[in-house]
Image: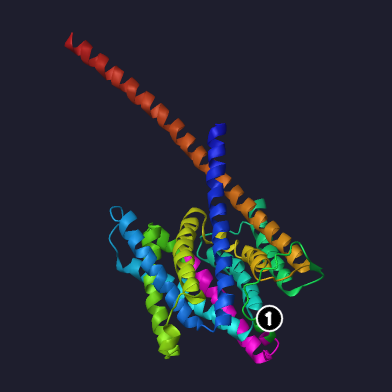
Amino acid sequence: MEKMQNYKVADGMKPVMVMVLVQILFAGMNILYKLVAEDGMNFTILIAYRMMFAAAFMLPLALVFERDCRTKLTWMVLFQAFLCGLFGGSLSQNLYIESIALTSATYAVAMYNLVPAITFILAIFFRMEKLAIDTNAGKAKVVGTVMGIGGAMLFTFYKGIEINIWSTHFDLHSQPNSHEASISHKSSGSLLLGSMVSLGSCVSYAIWLIIQGKLNKRFPYPYSSTALMSLMGSIQSVVFALCVERDWNQWKLGWDIRLLAVSYSGVLNSGLAVTLIAWVVKKGGPLLVAVFQPLLLVMVALAGSLLLDEKLHLGSILGGLMIVSGLYAVLWGKSKELQKMTQLESQTSLKYESNSQPIQVVTSIRGDVNSEKEMVERT
């Protein structure tokens, strides 16, 4: 019994460890985004290459590992894959980079932490999550989501005193402070429009998590679903990039930071990370993925401090603690719900067994009586 409980705990920790790995991969992508922005690469072309690299990476994996077990494709699966490519790939990513252009990277990342709340509302609306505010688990999920959003806002908008934890003297910036200097020139109109665009990106990402959960039930093959999503997203992104950017020189890739950015974001983020997200959605639902979004701020801050010589402040430490505390509260609530579900399943199975045993006894008694009657009649 104790071994079985330890196995369940270890199995329940797998989605958590996977999502931490996903946020680390996303943090590396954000660092590369900053570097290619300084290099002058068009972001719509970056998204197009990212989706193409993802499709080229995932299609062979799907053909090799899920060739024999995969069911036939239906029009509904293709339609849901098209929606996943739209909301989780081309649309959300292009809206995200447009919000960075209109506001700043820090502001866009802060707005993106509305994803847990939006996903929570959509999951309740589509009956993929239960609010259950009268239970401790439901209260923990609500409080944890609010704490994660509040910690992200505190992390972003409150600086406080500068804290020097380490000093690596390692800076990958080619033009230090060039991006921060351009932020002060943003007008109020562009900030308002950027906020609306960023909110649209958050809603698009949350819708993708919901559709991904629906697709997992109909087509439970993570490699194939990610490959279809990447293929659909690459077609959409290339068409959009061709409409926006007509200069073919922008499409050229060399052995430089641009090739590293598109290959990293395509293979590791839109390929590997999306496959892992699809697996976590299947295991724990869309909300379990969304609540890890504020953790990206902490990862980006640590990576920026180590690789870009960015400074940490008191607000970063306090906001990071709130994010981690909120994440723990949501995970605690999810674990309590999972324990309750397993208890109900075990109770129903015990009731079924207890109800089936008398029937078996009665049938065996009837069989014995009938056999005795037959023997008496023969004699």
Vertical comparison of 163 with 370: above or below = below
Q: Nearer the viewer, residue 211 or 121?
A: 211
Q: Nearer the viewer, residue 164 or 94?
A: 164
Identified at 69% across, 85% down, the residue is 181
Colour mode? rainbow
Looking at the rendered structure, the number of numbered marks drawn on it comes to 1
x, y (%) of residue 187? 67, 91
Vertical comparison of 222 with 250: above or below = above
The residue labelled by disc 1 is: 177
Q: Nearer the viewer, residue 279 or 267?
A: 267
* Left or right: where 270 falls relative to 109: left
* Left or right: where 316 falls relative to 257: right
Q: Would residue 134 be visible to someone looking at this image?
A: no
Identified at 64% across, 86% down, the residue is 192
Q: Would residue 50 be visible to someone looking at this image?
A: yes
Identified at 55% across, 81% down, the residue is 39
The secondary structure making up most of the magenta span is helix
Q: Is residue 189 magenta?
A: yes
Q: Residues within 10 Å of mark 1 (few under 14, many from 20)?
A: few
In the figure, residue 364 lies in which quadrant?
Answer: top left
Identified at 63% across, 89% down, the residue is 190
Vertical comparison of 39 with 20: above or below = below
| Residue that lies at the very extreme toward the top in this rendered image | 379
Q: Nearer the viewer, residue 200 or 304?
A: 304
Please identify the quadrant where the C terminus is shown: top left
x, y (%) of residue 29? 55, 69
x, y (%) of residue 319? 73, 65
| Residue that lies at the very extreme toward the left in this rendered image | 378
x, y (%) of residue 32? 56, 72
